[in-house]
Image (tube, rainbow, N blue to C red):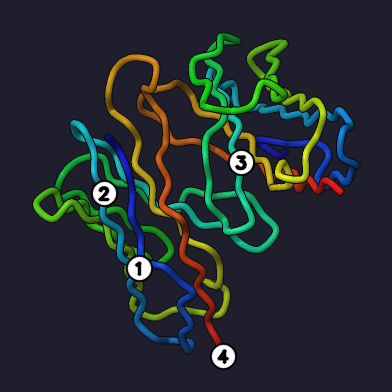
């Protein structure tokens, strides 16, 4: 009964390829997030969706595009992958935007060669 | 703006030693404060939280007190175990209304290694 799940767990691909990471939460939460963790463990928010609506969009290259088909899913599509995209990507969810803690998925380790 | 500064690691301790990981913050308004823990190969888990000044969050023997006067939220544990080895993140949640409501700001993480 994983609360926030991500697929795949590991993703190795070549520069220039397009790839997607999927995230699903079964907690009934309204808000979902994507974070990027670099090699030094620094976490930075990328996007946030509330009820399928984009509410946070940080300074992220246009090659990154989130898509939320419904409240339980938030996928991340990356075009034209670059070496610098190598990182661990975490999905998270919370009951709403304001007052509830965020629950994190196990992460997807993306390696671009 | 909002930001979190936590002590740089790595921190290496022997089992049963006392642990302190310092965390200070800058915030507009009155944020909620959190400690998250990341075990090797896993995602982040909420360890404890405090939502207002002088609140003490506690869990699994860890404690942190929200100190508004010193803008701090230091993590402490009286006797660490090998199983506590992980990366610890201090975070604040932006209380402001508007598009950034609910956003978490993380410190850079502190690696803790406990030896038997």
Estimate the spatial distance between the alpha carbons at disc 4 and disc 1, rounded to whole Å: 20 Å
Name the residue carrying label 1.
B21
Q: Secondary structure at mark 3?
A: strand
Labels 3 and 1 in the same subunit: no
Estimate the spatial distance between the alpha carbons at disc 2 and disc 3, rounded to whole Å: 21 Å
Residue B84: image x %, image y %? 52, 71
Q: Secondary structure at mark 1?
A: strand
Give the quadrant of the N terminus of chain A. top right
Name the residue carrying label 4.
B116
Estimate the spatial distance between the alpha carbons at disc 1 and disc 2, rounded to whole Å: 13 Å
Front-lying residue, A51 or B72: B72
Name the residue carrying label 2.
B25
Q: Sort mark 2 into few (<14), some (14-19) or many (20+) by Cα contacts within 10 Å.
A: many
Left or right placement of residue B21 versus residue A69 in this view? left
In this view, B12 is above or below B32? below
Residue at image x 72%, y 41%?
A: A85
**Sequence-first disc among 4 and 1:** 1
What chain is tagged by disc 3?
A
What chain is tagged by disc 2?
B
**Which tag is nearer the camera, tag 2 or tag 4?**
2
What chain is tagged by disc 1?
B
Name the residue carrying label 3.
A36
Estimate the spatial distance between the alpha carbons at disc 3 and disc 1, rounded to whole Å: 23 Å
In this view, A76 is above or below B49? above
């Amino acid at each position: 009964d994983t609360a926030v799940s991500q697929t795949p767990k590991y993703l190795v691909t070549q520069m220039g390829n397009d790839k997607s990471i999927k995230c699903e939460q079964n907690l009934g939460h309204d808000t979902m997030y994507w974070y990027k963790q670099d090699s030094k463990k620094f976490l930075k928010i990328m996007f946030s969706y509330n009820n399928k609506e984009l509410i946070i969009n940080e300074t992220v290259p246009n090659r990154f595009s989130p898509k939320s088909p419904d409240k339980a899913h938030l996928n991340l599509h990356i075009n034209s992958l670059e070496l610098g995209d190598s990182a661990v990507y975490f999905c998270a969810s919370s009951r709403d935007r304001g007052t509830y803690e965020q629950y994190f998925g196990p992460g997807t380790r993306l390696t671009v060669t | 703006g909002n930001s979190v500064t936590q002590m740089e690691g790595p921190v290496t301790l022997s089992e049963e030693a006392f642990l302190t990981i310092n965390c200070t913050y800058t915030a507009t308004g009155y944020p909620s404060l959190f400690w998250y823990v990341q075990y090797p190969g896993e995602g982040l888990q909420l360890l404890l939280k405090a939502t207002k000044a002088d609140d003490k969050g506690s869990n699994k023997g860890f404690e942190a007190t929200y100190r508004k006067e010193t803008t701090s939220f230091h993590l402490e544990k009286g006797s660490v175990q090998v199983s506590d080895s992980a990366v610890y993140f201090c975070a604040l949640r932006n209380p402001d209304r508007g598009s950034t409501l609910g956003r978490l700001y993380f410190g850079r993480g502190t690696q803790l290694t406990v030896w038997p």
